[in-house]
Image (cartoon, helix red, strand yellow):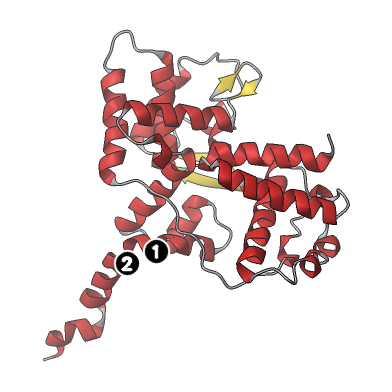
Amino acid sequence: MSDDANLIDRFLEMLVAETGASQHTLSAYRTDLQQASTITGGRLSTADREIIRKLPSHWRRLQSSTVARKSSSLRRFFGFLVEEGFLLNDPSDALPKPGLARSLPKTLSHAEISLLFESIKVELANEPVKPTVVRLSAILELLYGSGLRASELVSLQRSSVMRDKPYLIIKGKGNKERLVPISHQARDAVRRWAGFVDPQEKWLFPSRTGHISRIRLFQIVKEHASCAGINPAKISPHVLRHAFATHLLEGGADLRALQTLLGHSDISTTQIYTHIDSARLVELVNNRHPLGQRNLAR
């Protein structure tokens, strides 16, 4: 199997693990990436900007929506390659940028989040408690309570969680480190889970071959959602990250703070969450803008 074919397969596995992508979505990504690989002579996974600049000439007769989809597929693929260390520099800025609106992120309601955690609370009260339940509690607390990416969570080292520090040290996309606050509840859940892990173990969530995979994490979250009475199709580790961001924004967090917490390099990536809280923003203008307080000037 060529490098392109192998890395495309690994990328699609990541999509399933992090976003619960449907077979239709996976098929579209595979087609776009395989076609681009053919155009670049099987060098897509090692392509530089010069190679990528040649792609749009093959797309001239396509509709702008199709070009936008292909560009999006490639950007996400290159982001994956850089994050996983297969590619040093991301060449996707050489791709065309048709002016189409971004799709809105899926999220969960406060009631659905409550169902997830109430179900866990019931299971934690059983004696003796199952280690898998304790692990699940730590996973949910970190995904929803700290907004971690699936890749960040599975690769968490035991040393990332310090007893006397209210934050985690996370290595995110592009190997950039950031500090992520961790609540007392999440820290207690992680500490409880750590008691079930071999003290010599490097990873916080180990497996037989290293740390648990993103695909296994996806399965764990789906299985619990089903047990909690939530449609598994609605949830994934990435959806819990979106819920973290959405509910923080609803609670009054500003975009810059949210950008830092999520590890976004560009504020425009974070701005996608503002659609969810438009009602609060309207209320903010009405209550805080001088024209909304004209009675104060009378």
Apparent side of residue 52 relative to residue 81 in the rendered image (left or right): right
Residue positioned 57% across, 63% down in the render: 266
Q: What is the x, y in percent for residue 153?
A: 53, 35
Q: Relative to 88, is 5 above or below?
A: above
Check the image and name the residue furthest to the right.
41
Dot 1 lies on which element?
helix
Counting the numbered discs, the total is: 2
Q: Amino acid at mark 2?
A: Ser
Q: Are marks 1 and 2 in contact (CB under 8 Å)?
A: yes
Provide the residue designation for mark 2.
Answer: 278
Residue positioned 75% across, 67% down in the render: 59
Q: What is the x, y in percent for residue 44?
A: 81, 51
Q: On the rendered image, what quadrant is the C terminus found in?
A: bottom left
Q: Quadrant of residue 114?
A: top left
Callout 1 crowding tier (Cα within 10 Å): few <14, some 14–19, many ≥20: some
Residue positioned 41% across, 52% down in the render: 245
Apparent side of residue 72 relative to residue 158 in the rendered image (left or right): right
Q: Relative to 97, is 6 above or below?
A: above
Q: On the rendered image, what quadrant is the N terminus found in?
A: top right
The tag on residue 274 is 1
Residue positioned 47% across, 20% down in the render: 194
Using the rendered image of the protein, determine whether residue 198 is visible from the camera's viewpoint.
yes
Q: What is the x, y in percent for residue 61?
A: 73, 71
Using the rendered image of the protein, determine whether residue 149 is visible from the camera's viewpoint.
no
Callout 2 crowding tier (Cα within 10 Å): few <14, some 14–19, many ≥20: few
Q: What is the x, y in percent for residue 74?
A: 70, 55
